[in-house]
Image: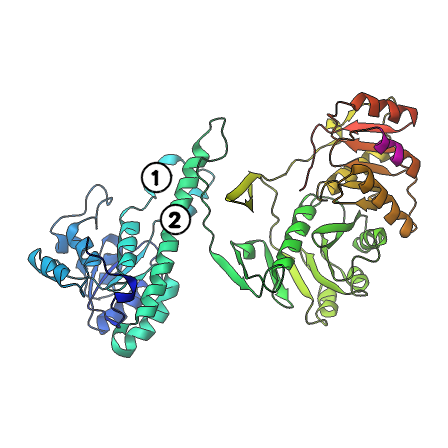
Amino acid sequence: MSLQPLDSLPKNPLKIKRALLSVSDKTGIVKLARQLHQSDVEIISTGGTAQRIRKANIPVTDVSDVTGFEECLDGRVKTLHPIIHGGLLGRTSHQPDVEEMDRLNIKPIELVVVNLYPFEETISDPNCIPAVATENIDIGGPTMIRAAAKNFAHVCVLTSPNQYHEFTQELEGNNKISFENRQQWAKTAFNHTARYDATIANYFNDLDKSEEKLPQQLNISLPKSQSLRYGENPHQKAAVYGSQNEFIDCFHGKRLSYNNFTDVDAGLNLIADFQNDKPTCAIFKHTVPCGVAVSDKLDTAWDKAFATDTMSPFGGIVVVNKELDIDTAQKINEIFTEIIIAPSYSEEALELLKKKKNRRLIRVKKLPHTIQNLQFRSIFGGALTQDSDVKTISSEELKTVTKRKPTEQEIKDLLFSWKVVKHIKSNAIVYARDGQTIGLGTGQTSRVEASEIAIAKAKQEELSLEGTAIASDAFFPFADGVEAAAEAGASCVIQPGGSIRDEEVIKAADKLDLAMVFTGNRHFRH
């Protein structure tokens, strides 16, 4: 192999003489073809693309006329031919390549415009079957894209209609395309085919119904959504990837920062568990809830959530599950709030809230977490992945393990506190009553310490713990946890169960006249 190091690649502008156009998405292709024709560029094309161009009275040569071999196998084979790929891969600045191309009668192709069969769109249809999916796997397209991108020093490759305008603007200048743009579009091309292949691989991974549900190969390919000013701290570079705009619309205030995105993610995941409940309000600080409440009215839900912790909400975020009305907006507006998230806003609420220019207002388009998906976390040498924790529980699934059964109101409080504790970092304890968090203990190395912090916070806010439900994200390893809860005023306990000392803990609860239910699953959050 005769190598040309990157530093020695010809970096002069490339004159476009011959172009190959073969696109699935034909947006803007006729306009592009017309500009190429006006610039004296010879156009060759395939199938439907050639028909579209010809219909617009623009001269075009079929690929089959170039190769001398007709399209075959129901269009599966069109461009997979040495005449085409020799034209794409030939290095016109490398004399041995030029001589060989002349000997084989291969003409250079300086421009390739290709986008791929809509595989991702096809499989998004829940009724799509494997036979239909596989017919939408493009073979010739990715091959041409990769060939052209590899040879970007001598070939320009476009993979999206969004690139046509910039390309034609430069072409109109002197019929030449700069090395810098060719290299940039080659990078885009390789990312494009990487995402395409990852989508296909993941589709086939999902078809595997064996016991091993997680794929042997982890394929993640996400487009950059936006660059961020910095990460958690100013000395850390950062960006966000994926399709966040499908879920939220940050329509007022500054752009979201790295820390904002993590806060919003925490808020959306919690409120997803309350999306069908009565008006619900949650207040977060550093991804941790500092107050959650439900009520018949949204402004009352705010009052109850704020009462849990009146210090922490300053500079925090607020998320609600119903349209944000003016009464609730007026109360939120009394303190400094970084972000407000709601499915919609009343006109009066918007008029008030928009007066603070830097406060970010977010409209929820759809909630995450409503279906099972994979979560990822980077670690040394790679990543961890797991199913998202979408587990919920109903009153029928609760297992009462004490002599005293919980009352109807206690069951409501238990289920509410269990929803909240799921979103608090371990070790996590939640005291709640009447749809309101009374005390929250989070992120402690000891479950008893987490409970002590929750109790202390409740006392600080002068909230009574009498008759509260206490939720623990994992089992109580010793009886001292429920003893402390009873002493604080709790009347019922919800926990996963599963400790070797469950019997000891249940006996303690019976002695203290506590009602205790087991869920059979825990909600660790590390």
Please state which of the two labelled residues, at mark 2 or mark 1, is closer to the viewer: 2
Query: Of label 2 and label 1, which has the lower sequence position?
Result: 1
Relative to 230, residue 482 above or below: above
Which one is nearer the viewer's eye here, 112 or 503? 503
406 drawn magenta? no
- Give the overall secondary structure of the magenta segment: helix
Point out the stretch of residues depicted in magenta.
Answer: 479-485
Which residue lies at the image location 50% right of the left edge and 34% below the top edge? Answer: 214
- Quick one: SS at disc 1? helix
Residue 437 drawn above or below residue 323 = above
Quarter occupied by residue 52 = bottom left
What residue does disc 2 label? Answer: 196
Secondary structure at badge 2 equals helix
Up/down of 6 relative to 489, above or below? below
- Compute the Cα span from label 2 to label 1: 13 Å
Left/right placement of residue 185 relative to residue 265 reads: left
Residue 337 point in image, percent of width and height:
74, 63
Is residue 335 at all visible to an observer of this figure? yes
Kind of residue indicated by mark 1 = Thr
Assess whether mark 1 and mark 2 are in contact (beta carbons under 8 angstroms): no
**Residue 137 location in percent, x, y?**
33, 44
